[in-house]
Image (cartoon, rainbow, N blue to C red):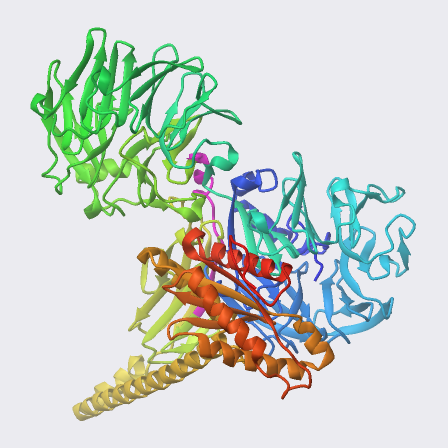
């Protein structure tokens, strides 16, 4: 459906400009507890600097078409789909469908809006309407047809945009009842309703409808707008009224001004949804042309080629944390600023496999890659050349000479001396170096250059080149780091430990006693005291050069990996450590405390692909592989140059996250959570499940809990979102939970749940008076009775658990079968095919085995449905499915991909063999007698074949096979075509 939103103020649903006056307090609270989030202006960042995350039915959405999006004051995000309403807490979706909970007549939902009291209004198929206020839903009388959009305006009036029944006006009363008022434009379809200071606007199939607060209404702008339906509306903070039609996007800057085309880029576009974000950028969703953005940089477009799940955009929303959510026909996309931004070949880098990063004294940054060297100066990236000649050399290391010259260390060509655009000198084996594999460079002057190679260490000076080997004191000849400290000492990292230069030879320093440490990949001098921090193959080592003492911060202290390649101090109290499994951030003071023995473990944050990195592999063994430059940490990775602004992360440290208690049960029984809960006497086990409603880093949210009445101390639970208590005594309890982002403070955001446990008879004072007056035998009797009761209850619980387990297992098996089988043909369906292809592609890639994919399409199948009937068409599908089964081996897969398209997946054979099998199938189909189904019926099929030899992913493989199918169709159909070659008829 066609929906719009605005991010100005705290508006949850587009088109509702004043209806949220009543939730101002809630909005102020949410913004006050998220102070730094407004700085992340998604609307102004380039698309390639935005982190993208997609959700589909695979991740829990009930349907891939997200018709509308809203966020309630408690922090939950809501998504309307054709198979129900999904509530999202950052980790999982809870699905609300038709039934007694919601009161909706159909699961299909098209509209979500939040009124001025924070209530969620849901509407959709079969005219269903229901209001959610916290955990309670209240159904409203249905509309006569499907609802495109519904809202409760600032005056408490309910407005309903329907398909084919016009705009319906009802009075919405506080008790939840409604009173019908009027219907405008009966017989027309309405798509969107927008409220402003003077009334409402409605986009309809007959044009733009104006409704005043006095009840007058009229169609306006007919002479200025194209004669087409109005699909979307937005009142911009500075542009005026925006009207999206099937033939373009128009704007009116003032009531007395005519409508004009907003921008030539939007002419003739079918505009389905609009959003103005916090930065003033305008987002435009279209029916089939993807997503557009208009900001200070101009107009930009995002479509399926750049990661949009589908080019049909049906909903837009900006949440409290300023992330942008895009609902499409193919899934949900979230755009946000990420901790890391990666620069690749797409932005001008000469190569994506980066090995060295060097800040230059002129303010630029030099980047060594496997395909040459790039220089980054502001927004400009240039490739380093030797005059007019390219330098496509695999570069491992970089160093700057006094005066600005640069030394380039290569993998196999030695050291190149670059000056003013030309190579002026070369150092290699022929000039005295022990190897042309240059791992690290340190240059004090042209007469004092240290060269670390894979076969020894060299020092280039005025008198020549001097080589140092293990016989000169080096622990090993594989040299990977050189560091000159603030006192002029030269330190060398090798594959067998550390070494210090003593004037003519080296003093070896072994750390083998520290968890068998051998490799010293990186050397960093502490900025505050004379200490070295070493990145090694067993973690982080703090070394005191004066005492010779070293302390390890490694796996035993909680580090997530063994091998660390480099240490960067971010000037904000944190170390950034690079590794093959991601980039690790630790607090320096914690590392010192672990090294001193004052702390057993260290907290860390591990950043991987989900944080903006294109690859978690941060390279090492050469370099420098990371650096501090221009207020950012820069890291060489296997998929580009990554950078992070530490201040971006510290913005969240004082963020107070909304937190919600989602589930409460006592002795296995689910209890209500909308008020104080009274538990019966004898309750033995209480479980509380909660969620911090932050969507930037939901997987890193940490929690703490307190149960007043049991223990007044807070218990930190890290990422655990369930608290369980057993054997609580009778009394009053208050459960408190608060959430925070990593390294953040507990800023007072907490949610409470009050409950009480009634005392058992023998837990009351009067009982003990009676016991004192009674006989000792009664005590024994009571004890026996109690034990029998507990045993019976335990047996009942065990039986219930076993029964429920059996039922759930059976139900899961039934659902799993139904979800993966095409009901018509009995073949695997598209979901089963997608999962199987992804798994088989990965397995074939790992085992280096061929995998072939065939996409088959029945030729002119629509004519069969049109000329004979859909029933005949279905019978044809079944016959074709039987033919496919006859030609598919055990272990291969035949699937119905959709409509008249089928797929065949063959493992351990290449595309040539798959094409031969396809040809046999083609002939079999062509010669099959379909006359028994309908006289004169003749069926042929076209095939597209590809294999994994030229596919980097299973998506590439599928696209290649589909392209081959298109080739077969283009060449006349009823033939087999292979990707990358001419087809075989």
Say left or right for 942 vs 585. Answer: right
Q: Residue at x 46, y 69 (%)?
A: 917
The single residue placed furthest to the left in the displayed view is 471
Residue under the image location 40 percent in, 64 percent down: 734
Which quadrant of the figure contains the N terminus?
A: bottom right
The x, y position of residue 444, in whole percent, is: 28, 13
Residue 482 at least partly seen: yes
Q: Image check: 980 left or right of 140?
A: left
The question of residue 751 being in magenta is answered with: no
Residue 384: image x %, image y %?
A: 44, 22
Q: Quadrant of the C terminus?
A: bottom right
Left or right: residue 448 versus residue 675 is left
Instruction: Name above or below for residue 185 compared with residue 509.
Output: below
968 or 173, which is in the foreground?
968
Q: Nearer the viewer, residue 949 or 348?
A: 949
Q: Nearer the viewer, residue 432 or 798?
A: 432
Magenta part of the chain: 643-663
State the image coordinates of residue 540 (x, y, percent, origin top left): 23, 37
Estimate the x, y position of residue 5 in percent, counting from the top left.
68, 53
Q: Quadrant of residue 195?
A: bottom right
């Amino acid at each position: 459906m066609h929906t719009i939103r605005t991010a100005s103020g705290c508006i949850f649903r587009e088109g509702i400009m004043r209806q949220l006056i009543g939730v101002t307090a809630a909005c102020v609270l949410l913004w006050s507890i998220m102070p730094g989030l407004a700085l992340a202006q998604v609307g102004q960042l380039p698309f390639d600097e935005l982190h993208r995350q997609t959700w589909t039915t695979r991740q829990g959405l009930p349907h891939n078409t997200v018709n509308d999006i809203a966020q309630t004051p408690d922090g939950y995000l809501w998504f309307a789909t054709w198979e129900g309403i999904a509530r999202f807490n950052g980790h999982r979706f809870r699905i609300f469908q038709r039934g007694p909970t919601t009161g909706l007549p159909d699961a299909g939902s098209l509209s979500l809006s939040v009124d001025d009291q924070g209530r969620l209004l849901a509407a959709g198929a079969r005219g269903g309407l229901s209001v959610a206020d916290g955990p309670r839903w209240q159904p409203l009388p249905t509309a006569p047809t499907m609802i495109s959009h519904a809202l409760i305006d600032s005056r408490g009036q309910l407005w309903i945009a329907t398909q084919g029944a016009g705009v319906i006006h009802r009075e919405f009363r506080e008790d939840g009842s409604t009173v019908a008022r009027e219907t405008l434009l009966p017989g027309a379809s309405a798509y969107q309703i927008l409220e402003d200071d003077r009334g409402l606007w409605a986009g309809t199939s007959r044009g733009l409808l104006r409704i005043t607060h006095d009840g007058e209404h009229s169609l306006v702008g007919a002479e200025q707008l194209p004669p087409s339906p109005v699909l979307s509306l937005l009142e911009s903070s500075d542009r005026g009224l925006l009207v999206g039609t099937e033939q373009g996007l128009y704007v009116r800057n003032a009531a007395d001004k005519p409508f004009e085309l907003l921008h030539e880029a939007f002419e003739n576009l079918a505009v389905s949804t609009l959003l103005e974000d916090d930065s003033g950028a305008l987002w435009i969703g279209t029916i089939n042309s993807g997503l557009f953005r208009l900001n200070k940089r101009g107009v930009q477009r995002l479509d399926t080629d750049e990661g949009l799940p589908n080019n049909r955009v049906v909903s837009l929303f900006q949440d409290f944390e300023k992330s942008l959510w895009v609902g499409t026909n193919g899934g949900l996309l979230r755009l946000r600023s990420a901790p890391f931004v990666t620069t690749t070949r797409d932005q001008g880098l000469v190569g994506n496999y980066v090995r060295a990063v060097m800040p230059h004294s002129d303010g630029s940054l030099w980047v060594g890659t496997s395909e040459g060297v790039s220089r980054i100066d502001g927004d400009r990236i240039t490739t380093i050349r030797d005059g007019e000649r390219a330098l496509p050399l695999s570069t491992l290391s970089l160093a700057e000479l006094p005066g600005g010259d640069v030394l380039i260390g290569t993998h196999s060509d030695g050291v190149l001396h670059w000056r003013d655009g030309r190579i002026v000198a070369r150092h290699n084996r022929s000039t005295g170096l022990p190897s042309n594999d240059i791992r690290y460079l340190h240059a004090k002057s042209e007469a004092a250059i240290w060269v670390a190679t894979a076969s020894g260490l060299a020092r280039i000076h005025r008198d020549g080149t001097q080589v140092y080997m293990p016989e000169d004191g080096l622990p090993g000849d594989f040299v990977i780091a050189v560091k000159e400290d603030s006192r002029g000492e030269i330190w060398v990292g090798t594959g067998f430990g550390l070494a210090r230069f003593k004037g003519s030879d080296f003093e070896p320093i072994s750390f083998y006693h520290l968890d068998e440490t051998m490799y010293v990949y990186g050397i960093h001098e502490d900025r505050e005291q004379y200490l070295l921090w070493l990145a090694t193959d067993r973690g982080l080592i703090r070394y005191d050069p004066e005492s010779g003492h070293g302390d390890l911060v490694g796996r035993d202290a909680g580090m997530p990996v063994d091998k660390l390649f480099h240490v960067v101090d971010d000037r904000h109290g944190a170390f950034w450590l690079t590794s093959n499994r991601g980039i690790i951030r630790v607090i320096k003071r914690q590392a010192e405390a672990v090294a001193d023995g004052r702390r057993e473990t260290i907290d860390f944050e591990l950043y991987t692909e989900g944080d903006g990195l294109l690859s978690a592999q941060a390279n090492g063994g050469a370099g420098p592989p990371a650096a501090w430059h221009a207020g950012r940490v820069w890291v060489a990775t296997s998929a580009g140059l990554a950078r992070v602004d530490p201040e971006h992360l510290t913005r969240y440290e004082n963020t107070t996250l909304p937190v919600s208690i989602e589930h409460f049960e006592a002795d296995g029984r689910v209890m209500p959570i909308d008020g104080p809960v009274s538990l019966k006497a004898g309750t033995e086990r209480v479980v509380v499940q909660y969620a911090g409603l932050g969507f930037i880093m939901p997987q890193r949210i940490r929690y703490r809990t307190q149960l007043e009445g049991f223990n007044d101390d807070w218990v930190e639970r890290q990422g655990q979102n369930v608290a369980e208590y057993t054997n609580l005594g009778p009394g009053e309890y208050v459960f408190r939970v608060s959430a925070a982002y990593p390294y953040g403070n507990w800023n007072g955001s907490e949610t409470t749940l009050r409950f009480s446990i009634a005392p058992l008879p023998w837990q009351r004072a009067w009982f003990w008076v009676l016991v004192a007056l009674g006989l000792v035998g009664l005590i024994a009797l009571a004890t026996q009775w109690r034990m029998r009761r507990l045993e019976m209850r335990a047996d009942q619980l065990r039986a219930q658990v076993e029964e429920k387990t059996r039922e759930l297992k059976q139900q899961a098996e039934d659902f799993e079968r139904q979800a993966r089988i095409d009901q018509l043909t009995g073949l695997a369906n598209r979901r089963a095919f997608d999962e199987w292809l992804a798994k088989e592609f990965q397995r074939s890639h790992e085992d280096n085995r061929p995998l072939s994919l065939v996409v088959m399409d029945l030729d002119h199948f629509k004519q069969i449905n049109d000329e004979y009937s859909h029933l005949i068409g279905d019978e044809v599908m079944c016959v074709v499915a039987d033919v496919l089964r006859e030609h598919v081996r055990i272990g291969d897969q035949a699937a119905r991909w959709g409509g008249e398209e089928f797929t065949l997946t063959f493992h351990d054979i290449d595309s040539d063999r798959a094409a031969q099998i396809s040809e046999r199938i083609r002939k079999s189909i062509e010669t099959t007698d379909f006359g028994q189904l309908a006289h004169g019926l003749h069926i042929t099929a076209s095939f597209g074949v590809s294999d994994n030899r030229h596919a980097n992913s299973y998506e590439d493989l599928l696209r290649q096979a589909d392209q081959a199918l298109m080739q077969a169709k283009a060449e006349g159909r009823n033939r087999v075509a292979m990707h990358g070659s001419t087809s075989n008829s």
